[in-house]
Image: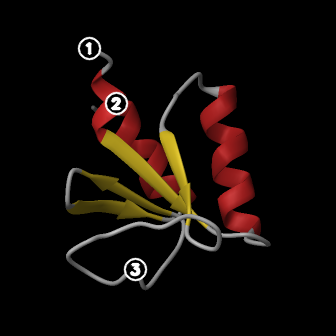
Amino acid sequence: MNPLSKYRLFISDGCDSCNHTLLKLKENNLNVSTVNIDTEQYQLPFKLMVIPALVKGEKLISYGCNDILASLNHS
């Protein structure tokens, strides 16, 4: 099982940081499922206050490009 399969990256339309994060993930061959909060239904036990946000299961792991990349590189 892919260790990254438990992660979801929450993004939004028109979010420069989200686009930058997606680019960096692609450059580093880190395949994480994405959820666009503007166009997709999602359910979390907490409100997303900052995007991009990385969630594992029902737990917020990190937000912002640098923290997300660091979290995924250490998983």
Is the residue marked by circle 2 packed among few (<14), some (14-19), or many (20+) residues within 10 Å?
Answer: few
Above/below status of 69 relative to 49: above
Q: Position of residue 38 (x, y in %)?
A: 63, 74
Residue that appears at 53% across and 72% down: 51
Q: Quadrant of residue 71?
A: top left
User: Residue beneath label 2, please?
Assistant: 5
Residue that appears at 48% across and 36% down: 32
Is the residue marked by circle 1 packed among few (<14), some (14-19), or many (20+) residues within 10 Å?
Answer: few
Give the residue type that dot 3 points to.
Answer: Leu
What whole-number distance in Å separates the C-alpha atoms at marks 3 and 2? 20 Å
Residue that appears at 60% across and 36% down: 25
Secondary structure, mark 3, is loop
Secondary structure, mark 1, is loop
Q: Residue 71: in sight, yes or no?
A: no
Above/below status of 22 relative to 41: above
Residue that appears at 48% across and 67% down: 41
Q: Which mark is residue 1?
A: 1
Give the residue type that dot 2 points to.
Answer: Ser
Q: For this rendering, which residue is in front, 37 or 68?
A: 37
Secondary structure, mark 2, is helix
Give the residue type that dot 1 points to.
Answer: Met
Indicate the quadrant containing the N terminus: top left, top right, bottom left or bottom right. top left
Q: Position of residue 23 (x, y in %)?
A: 73, 41
Is the residue marked by circle 3 packed among few (<14), some (14-19), or many (20+) residues within 10 Å?
Answer: few
Mark 1–mark 2 CB contact (< 8 Å): yes
What whole-number distance in Å separates the C-alpha atoms at marks 1 and 2? 7 Å
User: Residue beneath label 3, please?
Assistant: 48
Q: For this rendering, which residue is in front, 66 or 34?
A: 34
Q: Quadrant of residue 7?
A: top left
Q: Residue 52: in sight, yes or no?
A: yes
Left or right side of 72 for 23: right
Earlier residue among tags 3 and 2: 2
